Amino acid sequence: MMRMPADWWDAPTAVVCSLSRGPQSARAARRLTRNTLRDWGLAFLAEDAEAIVGEFVANAVTHAAALELSRKQAADGLGLRLLRRTGEVICAVLDSSDDAPVLKAPGSAEECGRGLQMVDALSDVWGWSPVAGRGKAVWAILFCA
């Protein structure tokens, strides 16, 4: 697994967007991702980045709801981070769950469980990092050089 610099998601150069736990949050995250990449002159990465971000947000919303029910507490802290570095773009979604994402190999009859396979195929590298006191960040890197 690739090590990420500590706390990069709080870098002042990161594009930051808080998200709700509602169904509209994935749409808002995809739109911000598309517009940001276009502004950065990286529109050719937008489709893949939107799909990755949409999957990360959908997973976070689903798992945050499960966390809220199981712990009987509000699962907040959902947010999108985009960071452009030399030769790469990092897309991350932060959520309040400490549970690691799991890349599954679902059976052909299963209706879900393929999202991280898609992320794995579209990104150059992906992973997750704990965020002290706030849950985790699930991130993907797209090379642009």
Image (tube, helix red, strand yellow):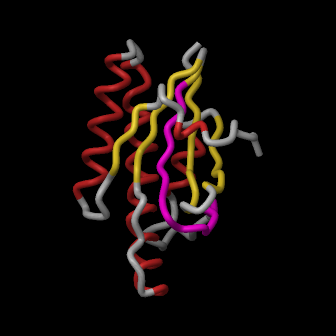
- Tell me which segment is drawn in magenta: 89-103
The image quadrant that residue 4 belongs to is top right
Residue 140 spot, x, y in % from top left = 57, 40
The image quadrant that residue 102 belongs to is bottom right
Task: Tell me which residue sits at (56%, 29%) in the image.
Answer: 142
Task: Tell me which residue sits at (32%, 41%) in the image.
Answer: 30
Count every numbered label the image shows and give the total: 0
Q: Is 100 in the magenta?
A: yes
| Above/below status of 46 relative to 140 | above
User: Which residue ends up furthest to the left in the rendered image?
Assistant: 24
Camera-side residue: 50 or 82? Answer: 82
Camera-side residue: 101 or 10? Answer: 10
Compared across the picture, whether 53 is left or right of 36 comes to right
Compared across the picture, whether 128 is left or right of 55 comes to right
Q: Is 140 in the magenta?
A: no
| Above/below status of 104 relative to 1 | below
Which quarter of the rendered picture does the C terminus lie within? top right
Residue 132 spot, x, y in % from top left = 63, 57
| Above/below status of 120 relative to 113 | above
Residue 53 spot, x, y in % from top left = 42, 44
Compared across the picture, whether 85 is left or right of 76 comes to right
Residue 55 spot, x, y in % from top left = 43, 52
Task: Tell me which residue sits at (61%, 54%) in the image.
Answer: 131
Task: Tell me which residue sits at (43%, 70%) in the image.
Answer: 64
